C-alpha cells in the first residue's frame, strides 16, 4: 500500500463531506418552523424576534447563509448555539468523550465476544453451539435496543439493584482517581452491555459468515479435499486473518453503533451526543443539530476510510473495488 | 427498469436458447425446497407469514378500534383485553394488530423503493461499467456513509412526524447494500456461459438483463432485502420511541413510546409492543439467513 | 387585603423572616392537597447535600436572558428577585426590603436591603437592578419584556438603596412580576459592557441567592454550595445542592425510589399511588412551575376557519368532551377540571358560578344536527346547509399539540369520534408549533398550556385581546375579536386595587364562557416528591432555600 493510495483515499473524503454538509444544511434550513420562536417561549414580541434574527444572521438569503456556514466549518467553527450563546464546537466536544466511552466499550465487548462465538459456531456449522448461539444472537439482534434497555433497567437496575438506574456518576460521591473510575465503570456497565448485545449479533454473523465463506473458498476446499478435518481447516486456513471481519464491522457499523448509542443514551440518561441531539431538536437549536450531524457523519466517513485502508493492509489481495 | 441506450442488437425472438430455462429455474426451485427444510427457514417463514397475514387482515382480527376508549385505564391483561389497556383505556391488543399493518406498509413500500433503486443503480453500473459505474458507485458510497438514523431523526423532527416522509426517507437511504449486491451478482452472471450464449444468439441488453440476469440475482437480493427490512422496522420503532412516530397511525414504536412513562406500573405496555417488533424483525432476519445459507451451499 | 402599605409589607416581611417561612398564609388557592406550602417537621438540621433531579440540560445558567423552564429550574437557587411570592402570590420582600406605591400605581419606589453581597463579595446596589432591567430583562426575558417593558417609562436610582419604576399610566401587576422567575437580578459589574447572552458568567454564575455555583458538567449535573453570606439569616440549612439531569420522567421516579436523588419536580400520575404506599416519600402539590404558574390546558378554535365561525359547533364540541376524563386519564387526577377561564390560583380574578358546557354527547349530537351537520350511521358528519360551508364538507379537522401533550389529542380524538367528528392529530415541537399556529395560522384546533401567571395581566389578557391576533407566539391563538373584552382588560390593568378588579374579571369570564373562543379543560398541578427525611421545601424556584435533611 503506497502513500499515494492513502492520500487519494483521504482526498475522496472531501467531496463526500461536502455533499453531506450540503444535504444536512439544506434539509434543516428548508424545514418549516422558526428557530427564533423557541428562544422566546411564551409572550415574546416582534421586536425580540427581529433582534434575534439579526443577531444570528437569519435574515440573509439561504445561499449566503450556506456560504458563511461552509467557510466557517472549514475553519472548524460550527457556529454559535442559539440557546447557550456558546460555540457549538465546544458544546459538542464536551459530549464526545461520553459517547466515545460508551461506543468503544460496546465495540470492544461485542468484538471479542462476537468473534469468539462466531469462530466457535463456524467450526461446526449447524452443530449445537452454532444453532444455539445463532438463535440467541438473532433474538437479541431482533429486539429494539430501547426495549432491551427498558427490560435491563427494570430487571437488573431497579429490580435486582445491581446497577445504577441512569447517569454516568454517583451524585453523592466525591470520589477521585481509581474510585471515580470504578464509579463510572459501574454506571457504564448496563448501557454498554445493552449496546454491545446488539453489536455481538452483528460481529457474530459477519465472523461466522466470513469464516464459512472462507471454508467454502477454493484453497480451503482443496485443503478439505485432501482430507483435513474441518477444525484443522478452520485453524490453519481460515482463522489466519481473524482480524478482517472485525475490522469490517468497526468501519461498516460505525453509523449503526452511533445510532444505537443515541437510543441507549436516552434510555440510560448517558450524557453524550445522543442526549444533546435530542434536547437540541426539541429546542430547535439548529447550529447544534447541524453540528452534531456533521461531526457524526465525519466520524462515519473516517471510520470507513480507516476500514478500507486497514483491510487493504491486512489483506493485500484486496484491490480497491 | 433499466433502459438501454443502445439500439436493440436484433429483434428479440421468443425462442430462448436451449438449456437456458433449466439453468434459470432449477436453482430457484432448489432454493425454495431447501429453505423449508431448514429450521431457520421454517421459523422465519412462519414468523414473516404471521406478520404479513396480521398486517393484511388485521381489522378483522382486532376486537376494537385501536383509538377508541373501550375499557378502564391501565388494566392488566385479562380476557376482554388480552394485552391490557393503556392509560386512556384503549385496547392494546387492537393496537398491536393495527400496528402490524403500519409496519407492513412501511416495510412493503420501503422494500419496493429499495428494490427499485438498488436494481437500477446496481444494473446500470455493472452492465455499462466505465464512468457510469464510477459515478454510481461514488453515489452509493455517499449514501452508505450517510448516518441514516441521524438523518431520519433530524428530518422528521424538523418536518414533523408523518408516515410518507418516513417511508421516503428510509427508502432513499437504505438501497446501497442492494445496489452493491445486484452489481456483484450481475458482474458474475454477465460472464457466465448461458448469458454469453444468449448474447451471441442476439438477445438485446434489456432483454438479457430482465430475462436472464435479474432472475438469477433475485435470490441473493431477497436475502439482503430481508436484512434491510429488518433494519427498517427497527429504525421505525426507534423513531416512534423517541416520539417521532405518526400520531394518526398506530405503530409498534408509537405504542412502545407510550409505555415509557408507565414502565413500572404497566409492564404490558412495554412488553407486547417490544415483542411484536422483535418477532417481525426476527422473522425477516431468519428468512434472509436461511436464504443466504441455502445460496451459499448451493454454489 | 386592602392597600399594600409599607407597614403591612414590613410586618409580613418580619413574620416570614423570623419564622422561617412556616407561617405563610394558608390560603392555598388551588386547594389541592394537604401538603401545600412549606412543610416544617421539627427543627431544621444543618448540613448535608440535597440531590435534585431536573429534566433537561440547561446549557447555560442565566435565568435573566430566557424564560426556558430548564434554565430556570437549574439556576434560580443562585439568584434573587426584588420580591418573592408566597403560595397565594402575595409579594414578600427579598432584595427589596420595602416599597411604596405612588401616583395611583404609576410609580413604585423600592428600598433595597442593606449589606447584600454578590457571591464574589461585591456589594449589591440599585445600579445592579437598573442594569438588570434595562440591559438584560427588558431585552432578553421575553415575558418581562412583553409585559413590564411595554408599560415602563423609566427606572431611576436616586441612591444606592433606592430604585424607582415609573409608568406612563397605573400598572397594577408589577409586584407579581418581580420574583426570581420573572425578574432575576444579575450583577452589573460582571455583565456591563458585554453581550449578556455570551458572557462566560452564564456558565459559572455569580448571584445573590442562597446557593452559589461550584461546577457544571453539561448533560450530567450542576453542583451548588451554600452561600454562607446569604442575606436571609440562618439560611440555607443545606451545605449544598446537586442538580442532576435526568430527562426521562420514569427514570426520575426510579432514581427517587432507589435513593439516587432526594427531590423530583414532577411525579407521573400513575406512579403516585406506589410512591405513596412506600412511606419513604413525601409530596408537595403546586401549580407553580419554573415555566409559569397557574396553567390551564386550553383548546383553541381557529375562528378564521368557516366551520368554527358558528358558535354551535364550538358549543357542541364542548358538550361532546368529558373534561373529567382528561383529568382522570391524562393527568391521573392531579389538578382540577377548569371551572372558569381564569385559574383558581388567582382567587380575586377567578369567576364563580359559571356553567361551561360539559360531558353531554347527546346534546352535542342534537346541536350539530340542528346546525346542519348530519350523520349517517357511525360515519363522520357532513355539512348540509351550514352557512359558509359547502354542502358535503365533512366535519373533520386537525388538532395540534406539543409532543408532551399528545395524550390530550388522543383523548380529544377518541371522544369526538363518538359524536361523528373526525380529528387528525399533529404533534409539533414547541418552535414549530408556535410558527404553525401563530405565524402561519395553519391549524383548526390545538391545545396549549396557557399559564395565567401570577396576575391576569401577565397570562390571561394576552389570549383574548384583538391586538394580539397575529404572529405573537402564545398569544391570541383562536383569533378572538371582541371590542368589549378589549376594553374590559384595559380597564382591569389600570385598576390597582384587586377588589376593584374582581368584578371586571367576573364580567370578562361570563362573556368568554358565552362566546367559547376557547375551551378550558383542566387546571394542571405538578406533584413534587422527595425523600421523607428531607423537609422544608418551597413551591417556588427557591425550593431548597429552607430545606433540610435529617439523616
Image (spheres, helix red, strand yellow):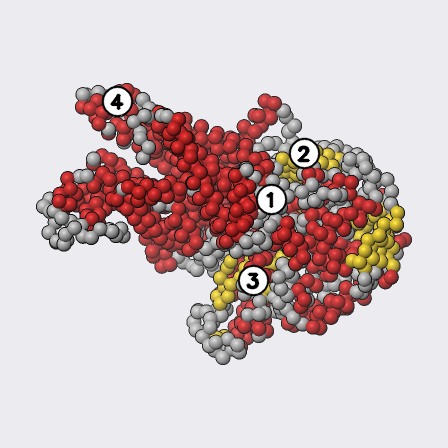
Do badges 3 and 4 share one subunit?
no
Real-space Cα separation, disc 2 to disc 3, in angstroms: 42 Å
- Local crowd size for mark 2, using a 10 Å CA cut-off: few (<14), some (14–19), many (≥20): some
Is residue C329 visible in this depiction of the protein?
Answer: no
Subunit ID for the residue under disc 2: C
From what the image shows, is residue A251 above or below residue A69?
A: above
Q: Which residue is mark 2?
A: C215
Subunit ID for the residue under disc 3: C
Real-space Cα separation, disc 4 to disc 2, in angstroms: 59 Å
Q: Nearer the viewer, mark 2 or mark 1?
A: 1
Q: Which residue is mark 3?
A: C440
Q: Which residue is mark 1?
A: A81
Subunit ID for the residue under disc 1: A
Element carrying mark 2: strand
Element carrying mark 4: helix
Asked if disc 4 and disc 2 are in contact, CB closer than 8 Å, the reply is: no
Q: Measured from the top left, where is residue A264 in percent x and y?
A: 50, 38
Q: Nearer the viewer, mark 2 or mark 3?
A: 3
Asked if disc 3 and disc 4 are in contact, CB closer than 8 Å, the reply is: no
Do badges 4 and 1 share one subunit?
yes
Real-space Cα separation, disc 2 to disc 1, in angstroms: 21 Å
Asked if disc 1 and disc 3 are in contact, CB closer than 8 Å, the reply is: no
Q: Which residue is mark 4?
A: A233
The residue under the point 34% across, 57% down is: B57
Q: Nearer the viewer, mark 3 or mark 4?
A: 3
Q: Measured from the top left, where is residue B90 in percent x and y?
A: 48, 56
Q: Nearer the viewer, residue C339 or C304?
A: C304
Real-space Cα separation, disc 3 to disc 4, in angstroms: 69 Å
Amino acid at each position: 500500500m503506497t502513500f499515494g493510495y492513502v492520500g487519494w483515499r483521504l482526498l475522496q473524503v472531501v467531496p463526500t463531506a461536502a455533499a453531506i454538509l450540503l444535504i444536512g444544511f439544506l434539509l434543516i434550513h428548508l424545514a418549516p418552523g422558526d428557530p427564533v420562536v423557541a428562544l422566546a417561549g411564551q409572550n415574546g414580541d416582534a421586536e425580540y424576534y427581529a433582534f434575534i434574527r439579526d443577531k444570528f444572521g437569519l435574515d440573509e438569503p439561504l445561499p449566503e447563509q450556506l456560504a458563511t456556514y461552509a467557510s466557517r466549518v472549514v475553519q472548524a467553527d460550527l457556529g454559535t448555539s442559539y440557546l447557550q450563546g456558546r460555540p457549538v464546537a465546544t458544546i459538542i466536544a464536551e459530549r464526545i468523550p461520553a459517547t466515545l466511552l460508551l461506543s468503544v466499550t460496546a465495540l470492544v465487548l461485542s468484538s471479542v465476544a462476537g468473534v469468539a462465538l462466531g469462530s466457535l459456531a463456524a467450526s461446526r456449522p449447524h452443530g449445537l453451539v452454532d444453532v444455539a448461539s445463532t438463535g440467541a444472537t438473532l433474538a437479541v439482534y431482533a429486539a429494539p435496543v430501547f426495549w432491551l434497555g427498558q427490560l435491563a433497567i427494570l430487571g437488573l437496575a431497579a429490580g435486582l439493584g445491581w446497577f445504577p438506574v441512569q447517569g454516568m456518576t454517583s451524585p453523592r460521591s466525591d470520589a477521585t482517581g481509581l474510585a471515580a473510575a470504578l464509579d463510572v465503570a459501574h454506571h457504564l456497565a448496563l448501557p454498554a452491555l445493552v449496546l454491545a448485545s446488539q453489536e455481538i449479533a452483528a460481529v457474530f454473523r459477519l465472523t461466522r459468515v466470513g469464516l464459512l465463506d472462507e471454508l467454502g473458498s477454493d484453497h480451503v476446499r482443496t485443503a478439505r479435499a485432501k482430507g483435513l478435518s474441518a477444525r484443522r481447516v478452520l485453524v490453519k486456513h481460515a482463522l489466519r486473518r481473524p482480524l478482517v471481519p472485525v475490522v469490517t464491522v468497526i468501519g461498516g457499523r460505525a453509523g449503526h453503533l452511533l445510532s444505537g448509542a443515541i437510543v441507549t443514551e436516552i434510555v440510560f440518561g448517558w450524557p453524550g451526543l445522543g442526549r444533546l441531539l435530542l434536547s437540541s431538536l426539541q429546542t430547535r437549536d439548529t447550529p447544534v443539530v447541524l453540528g452534531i450531524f456533521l461531526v457524526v457523519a465525519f466520524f462515519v466517513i473516517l471510520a470507513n476510510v480507516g476500514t478500507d485502508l486497514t483491510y487493504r493492509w491486512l489483506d493485500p489481495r484486496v484491490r480497491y473495488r | 427498469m433499466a433502459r438501454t441506450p443502445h439500439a436493440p442488437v436484433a429483434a428479440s425472438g421468443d425462442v430462448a436458447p436451449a438449456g437456458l430455462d433449466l439453468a434459470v429455474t432449477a436453482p430457484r426451485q432448489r432454493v425454495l425446497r431447501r429453505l423449508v427444510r431448514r429450521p431457520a427457514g421454517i421459523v422465519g417463514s412462519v414468523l414473516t407469514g404471521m406478520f404479513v397475514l396480521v398486517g393484511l387482515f388485521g381489522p378483522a382480527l382486532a376486537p376494537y378500534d385501536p383509538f377508541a376508549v373501550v375499557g378502564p385505564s391501565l388494566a392488566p391483561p385479562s380476557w376482554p383485553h388480552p394485552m391490557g389497556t393503556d392509560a386512556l383505556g384503549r385496547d392494546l391488543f387492537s393496537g398491536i394488530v393495527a400496528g402490524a399493518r403500519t409496519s407492513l406498509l412501511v416495510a412493503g413500500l420501503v422494500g419496493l423503493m429499495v428494490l427499485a433503486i438498488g436494481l437500477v443503480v446496481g444494473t446500470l453500473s455493472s452492465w455499462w461499467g466505465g464512468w457510469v459505474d464510477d459515478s454510481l458507485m461514488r453515489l452509493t458510497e455517499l449514501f452508505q456513509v450517510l448516518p441514516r438514523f441521524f438523518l431520519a431523526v433530524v428530518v422528521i423532527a424538523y418536518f414533523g412526524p408523518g408516515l410518507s416522509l418516513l417511508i421516503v426517507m428510509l427508502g432513499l437511504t437504505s438501497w446501497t447494500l442492494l445496489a452493491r449486491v445486484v452489481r456483484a451478482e450481475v458482474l458474475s452472471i454477465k460472464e457466465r456461459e448461458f448469458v454469453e450464449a444468449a448474447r451471441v444468439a442476439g438477445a438485446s441488453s434489456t432483454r438479457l438483463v430482465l430475462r436472464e440476469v435479474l432472475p438469477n440475482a433475485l435470490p441473493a437480493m431477497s436475502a439482503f432485502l430481508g436484512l434491510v427490512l429488518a433494519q427498517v422496522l427497527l429504525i421505525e420503532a426507534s423513531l416512534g420511541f423517541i416520539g417521532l412516530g405518526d400520531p394518526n397511525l398506530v405503530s409498534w414504536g408509537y405504542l412502545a413510546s407510550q409505555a415509557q412513562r408507565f414502565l413500572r406500573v404497566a409492564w404490558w405496555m412495554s412488553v407486547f409492543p417490544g415483542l411484536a417488533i422483535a418477532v417481525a424483525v426476527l422473522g425477516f432476519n431468519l428468512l434472509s439467513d436461511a436464504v443466504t445459507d441455502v445460496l451459499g451451499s448451493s454454489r | 387585603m386592602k392597600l399594600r402599605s409599607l407597614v403591612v409589607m414590613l410586618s409580613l416581611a418580619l413574620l416570614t423572616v423570623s419564622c422561617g417561612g412556616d407561617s405563610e398564609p394558608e390560603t392555598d388557592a388551588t386547594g389541592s392537597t394537604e401538603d401545600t406550602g412549606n412543610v416544617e417537621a421539627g427543627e431544621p438540621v444543618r448540613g448535608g447535600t440535597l440531590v435534585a433531579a431536573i429534566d433537561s440540560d440547561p446549557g447555560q445558567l442565566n435565568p435573566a436572558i430566557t424564560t426556558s423552564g430548564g434554565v430556570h429550574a437549574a439556576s434560580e437557587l443562585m439568584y434573587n428577585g426584588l420580591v418573592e411570592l408566597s403560595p397565594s402570590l402575595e409579594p414578600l420582600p427579598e432584595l427589596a426590603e420595602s416599597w411604596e406605591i405612588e401616583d395611583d400605581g404609576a410609580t413604585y419606589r423600592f428600598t433595597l436591603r442593606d449589606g447584600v453581597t454578590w457571591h464574589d463579595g461585591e456589594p449589591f446596589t440599585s445600579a445592579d437592578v437598573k442594569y438588570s432591567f434595562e440591559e438584560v430583562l427588558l431585552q432578553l426575558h421575553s415575558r418581562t419584556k412583553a409585559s413590564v417593558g411595554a408599560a415602563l417609562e423609566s427606572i431611576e436610582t436616586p441612591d444606592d438603596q433606592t430604585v424607582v419604576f415609573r409608568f406612563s399610566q397605573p400598572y397594577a401587576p408589577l409586584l407579581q412580576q418581580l420574583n426570581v422567575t420573572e425578574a432575576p437580578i444579575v450583577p452589573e459589574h460582571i455583565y456591563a459592557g458585554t453581550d449578556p447572552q455570551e458572557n462566560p458568567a452564564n456558565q459559572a454564575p455569580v448571584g445573590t441567592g442562597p446557593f452559589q455555583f461550584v461546577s457544571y458538567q453539561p448533560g450530567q449535573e450542576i453542583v451548588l454550595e451554600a452561600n454562607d453570606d446569604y442575606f436571609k439569616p440562618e439560611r440555607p440549612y443545606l451545605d449544598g445542592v446537586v442538580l442532576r439531569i435526568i430527562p426521562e420522567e420514569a427514570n426520575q421516579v426510579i432514581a427517587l425510589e432507589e435513593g439516587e436523588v432526594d427531590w423530583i419536580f414532577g411525579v407521573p400520575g400513575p406512579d403516585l399511588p406506589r410512591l405513596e404506599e412506600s412511606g419513604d416519600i413525601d409530596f408537595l402539590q403546586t401549580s407553580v412551575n419554573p415555566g409559569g404558574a397557574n396553567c390551564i390546558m386550553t383548546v383553541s378554535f381557529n375562528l378564521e376557519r368557516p366551520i368554527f365561525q358558528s358558535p354551535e359547533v364550538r358549543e357542541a364540541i364542548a358538550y361532546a368532551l368529558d373534561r373529567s376524563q382528561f383529568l382522570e386519564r391524562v393527568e391521573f387526577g392531579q389538578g382540577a377540571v377548569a371551572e372558569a377561564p381564569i385559574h383558581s390560583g388567582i382567587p380575586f380574578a377567578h369567576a364563580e358560578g359559571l356553567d361551561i358546557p360539559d360531558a353531554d354527547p347527546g346534546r352535542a349530537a342534537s346541536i350539530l344536527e340542528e346546525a346542519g351537520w348530519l350523520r349517517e350511521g357511525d360515519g363522520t358528519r357532513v355539512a348540509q346547509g351550514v352557512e359558509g360551508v359547502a354542502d358535503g364538507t365533512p366535519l373533520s379537522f386537525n388538532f395540534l399539540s406539543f409532543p408532551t401533550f399528545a395524550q390530550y389529542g388522543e383523548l380529544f380524538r377518541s371522544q369526538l369520534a363518538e359524536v361523528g367528528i373526525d380529528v387528525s392529530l399533529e404533534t409539533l415541537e414547541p418552535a414549530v408549533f408556535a410558527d404553525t399556529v401563530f405565524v402561519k395560522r395553519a391549524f383548526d384546533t390545538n391545545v396549549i398550556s396557557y399559564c395565567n401567571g401570577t396576575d391576569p395581566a401577565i397570562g390571561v389578557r394576552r389570549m383574548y385581546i384583538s391586538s394580539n391576533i397575529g404572529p405573537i407566539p402564545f398569544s391570541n391563538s383562536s383569533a378572538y375579536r371582541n371590542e368589549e373584552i378589549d376594553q374590559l382588560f384595559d380597564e382591569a390593568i389600570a385598576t390597582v386595587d384587586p377588589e376593584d378588579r374582581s368584578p371586571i374579571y367576573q364580567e370578562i369570564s361570563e362573556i368568554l364562557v358565552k362566546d367559547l373562543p376557547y375551551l378550558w379543560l383542566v387546571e394542571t398541578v405538578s406533584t413534587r416528591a422527595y425523600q421523607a427525611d428531607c423537609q422544608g421545601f418551597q413551591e417556588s424556584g427557591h425550593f431548597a432555600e429552607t430545606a433540610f435533611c435529617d439523616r
